[in-house]
Amino acid sequence: MKTRRHRATIREVLDVAIELERKTMALYTALVRTFKDTEELRGFWFSMARHEAGHCGALTLVESLLESDPTLAGDRKVWFDETTVARLRALLTAYLKEARRGVDVERALAMALDIESSELEDVVVDLLQVVKDRRWREQAVQMLIHDLGDLSFMIEKYTTDDQLLARADELVERRVGGLRTQVRARGVTASPPSARHVGSGVGRTGRVRRRR
């Protein structure tokens, strides 16, 4: 299938981004219920869902600002891949159905890694540039990457899949490096944390692989 990737206006992309963030939040809230009897897992999925809610709120703020002052967008364009969006939408729909039927922890973490590996967060970072408050943008960018460290830690702790862990750690390295480049290019002063310290609420215990 040929990829339909093109530059689109911020207004064109906003609705799609908000829709996908809400679907992601719905998946994570379903997993909160699935793992409600394990406090650490319940807290982890709640944190993931809460951060997705934050992404939705940030994008809704961008939408409101543009409605108030359309000139804020200027002639800025963001990359938009219709094929990737369609694939992610279908994936989220399928995963939500699967999660509601019940999944084990390894499958749940693999699903989350698939979703977090998408290009959606990169699009969100581009959209947030409409907001001129630098401190707010810095906080939003930090929130986008904190979940990745926690996800990698939970994969390390709750699974024995070395390939899954390697994928998670590679994603952390790639996302932090990419966001650091975007931050420098757009003049944001705060640097994203290093991949080693990217986790937030859960925290890391080191890179020694836990065996069972």
Image: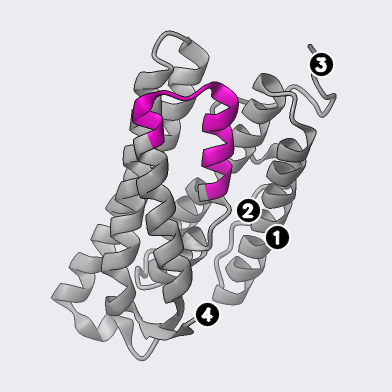
Q: Is residue 57 left or right of residue 193?
A: left
Q: Are marks 1 and 3 in contact (CB under 8 Å)?
A: no
Which residue is denoted by mark 1 in the rendering?
177
Distance of mark 4 from mark 3, alpha carbons? 41 Å
The amino acid pointed to by label 4 is Thr
The amino acid pointed to by label 2 is Pro
Which residue is denoted by mark 3 in the rendering?
211
The amino acid pointed to by label 3 is Arg
Quarter of the image for residue 203 reads top right
Percent across and percent down for residue 157 are 69, 21
Circle 2 residues within 10 Å: few <14, some 14–19, many ≥20? many
> Closer to the camera: disc 4 or disc 3?
4
Percent across and percent down for residue 81 are 46, 75
Q: Are marks 4 and 3 in contact (CB under 8 Å)?
A: no
Q: Are marks 2 and 4 in contact (CB under 8 Å)?
A: no
In the rendered view, tell whether residue 206 sits above or below residue 122.
above
Distance of mark 1 from mark 3, alpha carbons? 29 Å
Q: Measuring 39% from the left and 55% from the top, which residue is drawn there? A: 90
In the rendered view, tell whether residue 143 sits above or below residue 34.
below
Quarter of the image for residue 156 reads top right
Percent across and percent down for residue 79 are 48, 79
Which residue is denoted by mark 4 in the rendering?
3
